[in-house]
Amino acid sequence: MTKTYLKFRTRVTVISCCLIFAWAGLSARLFQIMVIDSDIYRKQGISQGQRQEPLLAVRGNIYDTKNVPLTRNIIHYSIAVHPSKIKDKARFADLIYESTGRKSDYYLNKLNSKADFVYLERNLRKEKVALILGQRISGLVIDREFRRSYPHNNIGSQIIGFTDVDDKGLIGIEKEFNGYLEGKNGWVVKQVDGEGRAQVKTSFPIKDPVDGSNIQLTINLEYQSILQEELARQIEESKAKGAMGILMDPQTGAILAMTSLPDFDPNQHDFYPVENQKIRVVTDQFEPGSTYKIVAATAAVATKKVSLYDEFYCEDGQFTVAGKIITDHEKFGLLTFPQIIAHSSNVGTIKIAQKIGQNPLYTYSRNYGFGTLTGIRFPGEMKGTLRKIKDWSELSLAELSIGYEVGVTALQLASAYAAIANGGFLLKPRLVKQILTPEGKLVYAEKPEVMRKVADPEIMSTIKDMLVQSVKSGTGIKAGIKGWSIAGKTGTAHKFIEGEYSQSKYISNFVGFFPAEDPQIVGVIILDEPRYGLHWGGYGAAPVFRRVAQRIINMDDSIQYHEPKTKFPKTVYVDASEKDNMDLVPIKTVAPYPTYQDGYTIVPDVRGMSIRKAKQVLIASNIRANFTGSGHVVWQSPSPGTKKLPGSICTMGLN
């Protein structure tokens, strides 16, 4: 053999061996992939060709007590892309521009990104993406998601609250009951093609989402709107820093309306101070002043240490206690116990408190719920401040009896007066009536709950009579409504600022309920730092209560007329068949309007009332009703205040 042949043979042998080893290695690797690790690679292949996508649950909605929706879920769209898969970026940018109106250059910059995935737009309404929704473009991803909307803007905003970008509740009912509202997302597996487009295959697994439950509140949206409007009006007139208000059903503890101003629009909450999101009715305490005198009055009646006929000398409006001079708004002399409450004498109330002592005053403060949480299911409630007797000073008995050295919330005041209205029971305030699944299954309900008994019904009836007298002839006279029996109490308190009581900044408040004989609504009105003159509770807050009550009476037939006396009226019947599809409707005796001695009667003002309500009022004044149209009264003839013979006709135009 020649050297050349041997060299050639050696090379062939080496190459052959290399090929054999390479083939053996490749075979071994193929065996590993196809046999040993087949499951692993099969799953990887599936995962690369399939994609699991979430199926979003729809957040439950919130409704008022009459099932008026307070929230909505609006579908929003987000546009995203895989930039590397967009072939004609300039043309694609122009297409997005035609949909959104934003310049193409903005999108080109994003499309030229080296990132694998880029959002071009987020939270767009359907009309903004209509041009591209039906397009099948490689690399384009359109995500659909729900966004919360609040159709009534500021009305009830602090109660309802709002959600974040992930649809989680941040404040209010949205936060407190987020677990019920949010539901549970599902998922679906989709087949993905080579260009990244996904489609559902019927054979692929799917888990359906569970939509959130719906919440029905005790809030009456119409009452809420009235309360906010009237408080806003009084802020403007009185130049007050803010205001608070609450309306409650004293028989059940249901909150019918609740607000503090200034407020905010949850649709644009970022544009408002965070402070506006607080519902200070629940979260803030203040010294109430004379609206707290119900505590001393109740303790006096309950302990029988003071009788209704006892008289107290009120020192001509100035009295010194523990070195501090206490003054009255008028120079009162001798006043009876009921007169002291009706005319809100500080001196007289302190003398009553001195007669009953510390323990009863503290005990009934606790009985009324002051210094403790009301138990309402709502975030941020403050329990207020009520110091124990051992921490009192020489002045504390006097100060507490007239509403100082105590911190209360507006909600606590409403609950306390509700106890007077319902005969002595402190009820747990309720905001939620019920929670239902989308299928209508009840999953949560708040029933009326008695927290404690404050005092016997006979005692509360006596206190109620005093409050009626306060509105009839005392400091609360501007809360009165002709023909209606209103019970209530005014309060005026110096604000405690930086360690001392201000001589120019006040809290003006009024708490009342109506109708006094069969109370259906308790109302609390509070003005923060109104201008001087309207700083008195009787001049600043009481008129707001009257306007709110009058508007509710005019629009709500369920609120019945009552005699302005402290006794239950007889039941009479009136024909109400015209519009109500009813034969006979029981109503309470209506208080007559003033009748002159010569036999004439005064035509009442029925404008703004429903036909049913207007007829009740006219019948009570011995005036016959005639009407045209339907709806509420927009004009009447004769005009209000006209003197007419009994049995005369009043014609009304309705709209």
Image (spheres, rainbow, N blue to C red):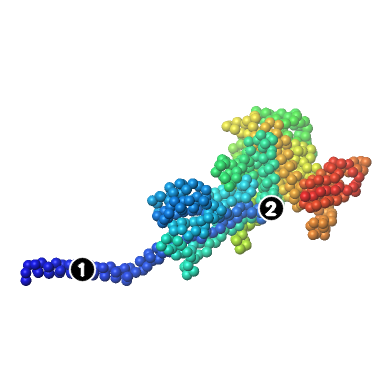
Three-letter amino acid code of the residue under disc 1 = Leu
> Which residue is found at the position 56% from the left and 42% from the top?
271
Residue 358 rendering spot, x and y as whole percentages = 66, 39
Q: Are marks 1 and 2 in contact (CB under 8 Å)?
A: no
Mark found first going from the N terminus, 1 or 2: 1
Above or below for 113 versus 207: above
> Badge 2 local density, few (<14 within 10 Å), some, or many (20+)?
some
> Which residue is found at the position 43% from the left and 60% from the top?
196
Residue 279 rendering spot, x and y as whole percentages = 61, 44
Residue bearing the label numbered 1: 19
Q: Residue 567: tell me if it is visible.
A: no
How far apart marks 1 and 2 lie (CA) works out to 92 Å
Q: In the figure, is residue 608 to the left or right of 285?
A: right
Image quadrant for the N terminus?
bottom left
Residue bearing the label numbered 2: 252
Residue 392 rendering spot, x and y as whole percentages = 61, 36
Number of numbered discs on residues:
2
> Badge 1 local density, few (<14 within 10 Å), some, or many (20+)?
few
